[in-house]
Image (cartoon, rainbow, N blue to C red):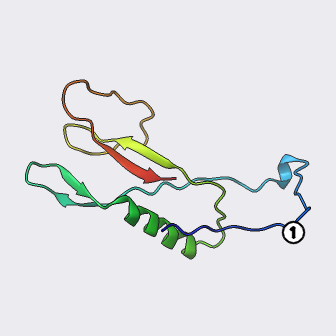
């Protein structure tokens, strides 16, 4: 179960942002499953997505200066040769022959 952190406004009150100076700085943090080890065939085994959500919630509790605006799932393709993820790579080739392996993370 994912914890939801919200701030409620009184009914009838709306916040209107009039200038960019009033906007808080924005950032994002990606949480991906940890590698638990390697199977016999050399394929790594990763923690499940529920563990990723739990780790993200633990991080949020330890960093109260951050406010969650939106969460989304993100995927990163693993290299088919060594099963390592390149998180800085913005374009990936989907193989029509062979195996495509992805990690699902939380942003």
**Furthest-left residue in this view:** 40
Is the residue 6 above or below the residue 106 in the image? Answer: below
Q: Is residue 102 left or right of residue 10?
A: left
**Furthest-front residue in this view:** 11
Residue sitting at x 89%, y 47%: 19
Residue sitting at x 44%, y 68%: 55
* Labels in figure, total: 1
Q: Is residue 74 left or right of residue 60?
A: left
Residue sitting at x 56%, y 75%: 61
Q: Position of residue 36 (x, y in %)?
A: 24, 62
Nearest the viewer among 48 and 88 is 48
Q: Position of residue 18 (x, y in %)?
A: 91, 48
Is the residue 62 above or below the residue 69 in the image? Answer: below
Residue sitting at x 88%, y 65%: 11
Which element carries disc 1, helix, strand or loop?
loop
Nearest the viewer among 71 and 91 is 71
Q: Position of residue 30 (x, y in %)?
A: 48, 54
Q: Position of residue 97 (x, y in %)?
A: 20, 25
* Residue 87 sits in quarter: top left
For label 1, the crowd category at 10 Å Cα-Cα, with few meaning under 14, some 14 to 19 and many 20 or more, is: few
Is the residue 102 above or below the residue 12 in the image? Answer: above
**Furthest-bottom residue in this view:** 62
* Residue 32 sits in quarter: bottom left
* Residue under numbered circle 1: 10
**Furthest-top residue in this view:** 96
Q: Is residue 8 left or right of residue 102?
A: right
């Amino acid at each position: 179960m994912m914890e939801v952190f919200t701030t409620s406004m009184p009914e009838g009150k709306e916040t209107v942002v009039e200038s960019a100076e009033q906007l808080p700085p924005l950032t994002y943090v990606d949480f991906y499953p940890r590698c638990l080890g390697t199977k016999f065939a050399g394929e790594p085994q990763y923690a499940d997505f529920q563990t990723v959500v739990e780790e993200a919630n633990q991080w949020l509790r330890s960093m109260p200066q951050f406010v969650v605006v939106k969460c989304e799932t993100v995927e990163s393709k693993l290299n088919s040769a060594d099963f390592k993820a390149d998180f800085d790579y913005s374009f990936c080739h989907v193989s029509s022959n062979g195996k495509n392996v992805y990690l699902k993370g939380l942003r």
